Image (tube, rainbow, N blue to C red):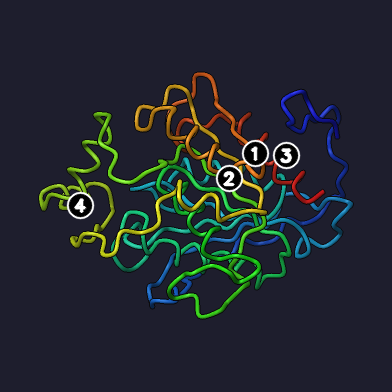
Amino acid sequence: MRIDPAGRVVRSTPIPHSETNRGTPIRTFLHTADGVTIDSVYDPPAVVYDASPSPARGLAFVVAHGFTGDADRPHVRRVAEAFTQYGAVVTFSFRGHGASGGRSTVGDREVLDLAAAVEWARSLGHTRVVTVGFSMGGSVVLRHAALYRRDGAGDDSGREGRTEAHSDGVVSVSAPARWYYRGTAPMRRVHWLITRPEGRLVGRYGLRTRIHHQDWDPVPLSPVEAVPRIAPTPVLIVHGDRDGYFPLDHPRMLAAAAGDHGELWLEPGMGHAENAAPDELLRRIGDWAVAQGG
Protein backbone atom coordinates (compact mmCIF):
# COMPACT_ATOMS: atom_id res chain seq x y z
CA MET A 1 0.00 0.00 0.00
CA ARG A 2 1.24 3.51 -0.80
CA ILE A 3 -0.13 7.00 -0.21
CA ASP A 4 -0.41 9.64 -2.94
CA PRO A 5 0.43 13.35 -2.33
CA ALA A 6 -3.22 14.01 -1.42
CA GLY A 7 -3.00 11.44 1.35
CA ARG A 8 -5.10 8.79 -0.43
CA VAL A 9 -4.34 5.10 -0.55
CA VAL A 10 -3.17 3.95 -3.99
CA ARG A 11 -3.14 0.33 -5.07
CA SER A 12 -0.20 -0.62 -7.24
CA THR A 13 -0.92 -4.36 -7.02
CA PRO A 14 -4.04 -6.29 -6.03
CA ILE A 15 -4.53 -6.85 -2.31
CA PRO A 16 -3.68 -10.49 -1.53
CA HIS A 17 -6.69 -12.54 -0.60
CA SER A 18 -7.69 -16.11 -0.09
CA GLU A 19 -10.53 -17.68 -2.04
CA THR A 20 -13.61 -18.32 0.01
CA ASN A 21 -17.29 -18.96 -0.38
CA ARG A 22 -18.85 -15.55 -0.14
CA GLY A 23 -21.73 -16.67 2.03
CA THR A 24 -25.41 -15.94 1.85
CA PRO A 25 -26.86 -12.44 2.22
CA ILE A 26 -29.20 -11.96 5.17
CA ARG A 27 -32.39 -9.91 5.07
CA THR A 28 -34.31 -9.03 8.20
CA PHE A 29 -36.30 -6.33 9.96
CA LEU A 30 -34.49 -4.52 12.73
CA HIS A 31 -36.25 -2.66 15.55
CA THR A 32 -35.16 0.83 16.52
CA ALA A 33 -35.11 2.20 20.04
CA ASP A 34 -38.43 3.96 19.36
CA GLY A 35 -40.09 0.82 17.97
CA VAL A 36 -39.87 1.32 14.18
CA THR A 37 -39.17 -1.70 11.94
CA ILE A 38 -36.28 -1.18 9.53
CA ASP A 39 -35.84 -3.35 6.43
CA SER A 40 -32.15 -4.34 6.39
CA VAL A 41 -29.77 -6.40 4.25
CA TYR A 42 -26.38 -7.89 5.14
CA ASP A 43 -23.97 -8.72 2.30
CA PRO A 44 -20.86 -10.73 3.29
CA PRO A 45 -17.50 -9.60 1.91
CA ALA A 46 -16.59 -10.79 -1.56
CA VAL A 47 -13.11 -11.83 -0.38
CA VAL A 48 -11.42 -12.61 2.92
CA TYR A 49 -8.17 -10.70 3.29
CA ASP A 50 -5.15 -12.56 4.63
CA ALA A 51 -4.88 -10.09 7.50
CA SER A 52 -8.37 -11.05 8.62
CA PRO A 53 -8.91 -14.80 8.24
CA SER A 54 -12.47 -14.58 9.54
CA PRO A 55 -14.83 -12.11 7.84
CA ALA A 56 -16.63 -11.73 11.17
CA ARG A 57 -13.47 -10.08 12.57
CA GLY A 58 -13.12 -7.61 9.72
CA LEU A 59 -14.53 -4.35 8.49
CA ALA A 60 -18.21 -3.66 7.89
CA PHE A 61 -19.73 -0.73 6.02
CA VAL A 62 -23.17 0.55 6.96
CA VAL A 63 -24.64 2.51 4.05
CA ALA A 64 -27.20 5.27 4.69
CA HIS A 65 -29.08 6.19 1.50
CA GLY A 66 -30.44 9.56 0.45
CA PHE A 67 -33.98 10.91 0.74
CA THR A 68 -36.51 8.85 -1.32
CA GLY A 69 -34.00 5.98 -1.66
CA ASP A 70 -34.22 2.51 -0.13
CA ALA A 71 -32.17 -0.66 0.19
CA ASP A 72 -33.42 -2.06 -3.14
CA ARG A 73 -32.68 0.95 -5.35
CA PRO A 74 -30.16 0.09 -8.08
CA HIS A 75 -27.78 2.88 -7.06
CA VAL A 76 -27.76 1.64 -3.45
CA ARG A 77 -27.11 -1.93 -4.58
CA ARG A 78 -24.22 -0.67 -6.76
CA VAL A 79 -22.65 1.06 -3.75
CA ALA A 80 -23.07 -2.08 -1.65
CA GLU A 81 -21.48 -4.28 -4.31
CA ALA A 82 -18.48 -1.95 -4.56
CA PHE A 83 -17.88 -2.01 -0.81
CA THR A 84 -18.10 -5.82 -0.56
CA GLN A 85 -14.64 -5.82 -2.16
CA TYR A 86 -13.37 -4.34 1.14
CA GLY A 87 -15.62 -5.83 3.82
CA ALA A 88 -19.15 -6.76 4.70
CA VAL A 89 -21.94 -4.31 3.93
CA VAL A 90 -25.20 -3.50 5.71
CA THR A 91 -27.78 -1.57 3.74
CA PHE A 92 -31.19 -0.59 5.05
CA SER A 93 -34.22 1.53 4.25
CA PHE A 94 -34.74 4.54 6.49
CA ARG A 95 -38.11 4.84 8.25
CA GLY A 96 -40.85 5.78 5.84
CA HIS A 97 -38.84 4.46 2.88
CA GLY A 98 -39.41 1.23 0.98
CA ALA A 99 -40.54 -1.66 3.18
CA SER A 100 -39.53 -0.04 6.49
CA GLY A 101 -42.18 1.12 8.93
CA GLY A 102 -42.89 4.58 10.25
CA ARG A 103 -42.67 7.89 8.45
CA SER A 104 -39.65 9.87 7.36
CA THR A 105 -38.55 12.75 9.59
CA VAL A 106 -36.01 13.76 6.92
CA GLY A 107 -32.89 13.30 9.03
CA ASP A 108 -34.06 13.67 12.64
CA ARG A 109 -35.14 10.31 14.11
CA GLU A 110 -33.25 8.54 11.34
CA VAL A 111 -30.21 8.43 13.63
CA LEU A 112 -32.06 5.67 15.50
CA ASP A 113 -32.39 3.68 12.26
CA LEU A 114 -28.66 3.95 11.62
CA ALA A 115 -27.87 3.02 15.22
CA ALA A 116 -29.90 -0.18 14.86
CA ALA A 117 -28.03 -1.07 11.66
CA VAL A 118 -24.63 -0.45 13.27
CA GLU A 119 -25.60 -2.56 16.27
CA TRP A 120 -26.64 -5.36 13.91
CA ALA A 121 -23.28 -5.25 12.14
CA ARG A 122 -21.47 -5.54 15.47
CA SER A 123 -23.76 -8.36 16.61
CA LEU A 124 -22.58 -10.32 13.56
CA GLY A 125 -19.02 -10.08 14.91
CA HIS A 126 -17.58 -7.08 13.06
CA THR A 127 -15.13 -5.16 15.19
CA ARG A 128 -14.80 -2.11 12.89
CA VAL A 129 -17.80 -0.32 11.40
CA VAL A 130 -17.57 2.59 8.96
CA THR A 131 -20.77 4.47 8.21
CA VAL A 132 -21.17 5.92 4.70
CA GLY A 133 -24.06 8.29 4.06
CA PHE A 134 -25.32 10.09 0.96
CA SER A 135 -27.23 13.41 0.97
CA MET A 136 -29.80 13.03 3.79
CA GLY A 137 -27.91 9.92 4.85
CA GLY A 138 -24.73 12.00 4.85
CA SER A 139 -26.22 14.32 7.45
CA VAL A 140 -27.45 11.33 9.46
CA VAL A 141 -24.03 9.65 9.67
CA LEU A 142 -22.52 12.88 11.01
CA ARG A 143 -25.18 13.36 13.68
CA HIS A 144 -25.09 9.66 14.57
CA ALA A 145 -21.30 9.76 15.11
CA ALA A 146 -21.65 12.81 17.37
CA LEU A 147 -24.45 11.28 19.41
CA TYR A 148 -23.31 7.64 19.61
CA ARG A 149 -19.73 7.90 20.79
CA ARG A 150 -17.36 5.14 21.81
CA ASP A 151 -16.80 6.91 25.14
CA GLY A 152 -20.54 7.18 25.80
CA ALA A 153 -20.38 10.98 25.95
CA GLY A 154 -23.16 11.57 23.40
CA ASP A 155 -26.64 12.80 24.17
CA ASP A 156 -28.79 10.61 21.95
CA SER A 157 -32.38 10.16 23.06
CA GLY A 158 -33.44 6.55 22.69
CA ARG A 159 -30.03 4.93 22.90
CA GLU A 160 -30.44 3.77 26.50
CA GLY A 161 -26.68 3.40 26.98
CA ARG A 162 -25.98 0.99 24.10
CA THR A 163 -22.38 1.91 23.24
CA GLU A 164 -22.11 -0.79 20.53
CA ALA A 165 -23.90 1.61 18.17
CA HIS A 166 -20.82 3.81 17.68
CA SER A 167 -18.92 4.08 14.38
CA ASP A 168 -15.17 3.77 13.85
CA GLY A 169 -15.08 5.99 10.78
CA VAL A 170 -17.54 8.29 9.01
CA VAL A 171 -17.91 9.12 5.32
CA SER A 172 -20.42 11.84 4.42
CA VAL A 173 -21.14 12.31 0.71
CA SER A 174 -23.14 15.24 -0.75
CA ALA A 175 -24.46 16.28 2.65
CA PRO A 176 -25.88 19.62 3.74
CA ALA A 177 -24.05 21.58 6.42
CA ARG A 178 -27.12 23.38 7.74
CA TRP A 179 -30.87 22.86 7.84
CA TYR A 180 -33.64 24.58 5.84
CA TYR A 181 -31.41 25.37 2.86
CA ARG A 182 -33.51 26.54 -0.12
CA GLY A 183 -30.85 28.22 -2.23
CA THR A 184 -31.15 25.88 -5.26
CA ALA A 185 -34.14 24.84 -7.36
CA PRO A 186 -33.80 21.13 -6.45
CA MET A 187 -33.88 21.98 -2.74
CA ARG A 188 -36.94 24.18 -3.21
CA ARG A 189 -38.66 21.17 -4.80
CA VAL A 190 -37.58 18.98 -1.86
CA HIS A 191 -39.09 21.46 0.60
CA TRP A 192 -42.34 21.47 -1.37
CA LEU A 193 -42.38 17.67 -1.18
CA ILE A 194 -41.86 17.74 2.60
CA THR A 195 -44.00 20.67 3.71
CA ARG A 196 -47.06 20.57 1.41
CA PRO A 197 -49.86 17.98 1.70
CA GLU A 198 -49.86 17.48 -2.07
CA GLY A 199 -46.08 17.06 -1.97
CA ARG A 200 -46.34 14.34 0.65
CA LEU A 201 -48.91 12.55 -1.56
CA VAL A 202 -46.40 12.60 -4.41
CA GLY A 203 -43.80 11.24 -2.01
CA ARG A 204 -46.06 8.39 -0.84
CA TYR A 205 -47.41 7.22 -4.18
CA GLY A 206 -44.74 8.37 -6.61
CA LEU A 207 -41.52 7.92 -4.65
CA ARG A 208 -42.38 5.16 -2.11
CA THR A 209 -41.59 7.60 0.70
CA ARG A 210 -43.99 8.32 3.54
CA ILE A 211 -43.16 11.70 5.06
CA HIS A 212 -44.19 12.84 8.52
CA HIS A 213 -46.44 15.89 8.51
CA GLN A 214 -45.14 17.41 11.76
CA ASP A 215 -42.36 19.98 11.93
CA TRP A 216 -39.21 19.24 13.92
CA ASP A 217 -39.68 19.99 17.61
CA PRO A 218 -37.05 20.51 18.81
CA VAL A 219 -34.86 21.20 15.78
CA PRO A 220 -32.13 18.53 15.79
CA LEU A 221 -28.42 19.22 15.98
CA SER A 222 -27.30 20.42 12.54
CA PRO A 223 -24.53 18.58 10.65
CA VAL A 224 -22.04 21.43 11.05
CA GLU A 225 -22.75 21.53 14.80
CA ALA A 226 -22.35 17.77 15.03
CA VAL A 227 -18.99 17.45 13.30
CA PRO A 228 -16.77 18.91 16.08
CA ARG A 229 -18.26 16.39 18.52
CA ILE A 230 -17.15 13.41 16.43
CA ALA A 231 -13.42 13.66 17.25
CA PRO A 232 -11.29 11.61 17.48
CA THR A 233 -13.28 9.39 15.07
CA PRO A 234 -11.97 10.09 11.53
CA VAL A 235 -14.35 11.88 9.15
CA LEU A 236 -14.24 12.05 5.36
CA ILE A 237 -16.34 14.73 3.62
CA VAL A 238 -16.95 14.10 -0.10
CA HIS A 239 -18.74 16.51 -2.43
CA GLY A 240 -19.06 17.02 -6.16
CA ASP A 241 -18.24 20.39 -7.66
CA ARG A 242 -21.36 20.06 -9.85
CA ASP A 243 -23.75 19.19 -7.03
CA GLY A 244 -27.09 20.77 -7.96
CA TYR A 245 -28.52 20.57 -4.44
CA PHE A 246 -25.83 21.93 -2.13
CA PRO A 247 -23.06 24.31 -3.31
CA LEU A 248 -19.47 24.01 -2.19
CA ASP A 249 -19.84 26.20 0.90
CA HIS A 250 -21.59 23.23 2.55
CA PRO A 251 -18.69 20.74 2.40
CA ARG A 252 -16.20 23.49 3.19
CA MET A 253 -18.14 24.41 6.33
CA LEU A 254 -18.21 20.75 7.38
CA ALA A 255 -14.49 20.29 6.75
CA ALA A 256 -13.63 23.45 8.68
CA ALA A 257 -15.73 22.23 11.60
CA ALA A 258 -14.00 18.83 11.50
CA GLY A 259 -10.53 20.34 11.93
CA ASP A 260 -7.61 17.94 12.18
CA HIS A 261 -9.76 14.79 12.39
CA GLY A 262 -11.47 15.53 9.04
CA GLU A 263 -10.56 15.23 5.38
CA LEU A 264 -12.24 16.91 2.40
CA TRP A 265 -12.45 15.53 -1.14
CA LEU A 266 -13.96 17.87 -3.73
CA GLU A 267 -14.69 15.71 -6.76
CA PRO A 268 -14.38 17.37 -10.21
CA GLY A 269 -17.41 16.84 -12.43
CA MET A 270 -19.44 14.94 -9.83
CA GLY A 271 -23.10 15.72 -9.21
CA HIS A 272 -25.22 14.69 -6.24
CA ALA A 273 -25.16 11.58 -4.03
CA GLU A 274 -25.26 7.87 -4.95
CA ASN A 275 -26.37 8.26 -8.57
CA ALA A 276 -23.43 10.56 -9.30
CA ALA A 277 -20.72 8.68 -7.38
CA PRO A 278 -18.44 6.95 -9.90
CA ASP A 279 -17.05 3.49 -9.24
CA GLU A 280 -13.56 4.94 -8.94
CA LEU A 281 -14.70 7.17 -6.08
CA LEU A 282 -16.32 4.23 -4.29
CA ARG A 283 -13.01 2.35 -4.55
CA ARG A 284 -11.14 5.28 -3.02
CA ILE A 285 -13.66 5.43 -0.19
CA GLY A 286 -13.12 1.72 0.39
CA ASP A 287 -9.36 2.25 0.49
CA TRP A 288 -9.81 5.13 2.95
CA ALA A 289 -11.91 2.94 5.24
CA VAL A 290 -9.31 0.15 5.18
CA ALA A 291 -6.52 2.64 5.92
CA GLN A 292 -8.32 3.93 9.03
CA GLY A 293 -7.77 0.53 10.60
CA GLY A 294 -4.02 0.80 10.19
Residue 279 position (above or below residue 288):
above
Question: Which of the two residues, 240 or 43, is positioned nearer the viewer here?
Answer: 240
Percent coordinates x, y for residue 199 in the rendering: 15, 47
Residue contact between numbered discs 3 and 2, judged by CB atoms under 8 Å: no
Residue found at x 42% / y 58%: 93
Q: Which residue is mark 1?
A: 285
Earlier in the chain: of badge 4 and badge 3, it is: 4
CA gap, disc 3 and disc 2: 12 Å
Residue 152 picture quarter: bottom right
Q: Nearer the viewer, mark 4 or mark 1?
A: 1
What residue is pinned by disc 4? 205
Query: Badges 4 and 3: C-beta atoms under 8 Å apart?
Result: no
**Residue 31 occupies quadrant:** bottom left
Q: For mark 2, give the secondary structure.
A: strand
Residue 179, horizontal then vertical, whole percent: 33, 46
Q: Are marks 2 and 1 in contact (CB under 8 Å)?
A: yes
Task: Name the kind of residue labelled 1 in the image.
Answer: Ile
Front of the two marks 4 and 2: 2
> Pointer 2: residues within 10 angstroms few (<14), some, or many (20+)?
many
**Image height check: is 88 above or below 199?**
below
Q: How far apart are the two marked residues, 4 and 2, measured between alpha carbons?
A: 31 Å
Q: Which mark is residue 171?
A: 2
Which residue type carries mark 4? Tyr
Under mark 3, the amino acid is Asp
Whole-angstrom CA distance, mark 2 to mark 1, is 8 Å
Disc number placed over residue 242 in the picture, else none: none
Q: Quadrant of the N terminus?
A: top right
**Does label 4 or label 1 sit earlier along the sequence?**
4
Q: Amino acid at mark 2?
A: Val
Q: Circle 3 sits on which residue? A: 287
Instruction: Examine the image and state in which quarter residue 10 appears.
Output: top right
Compare marks 4 and 2 and give the one earlier in the sequence: 2
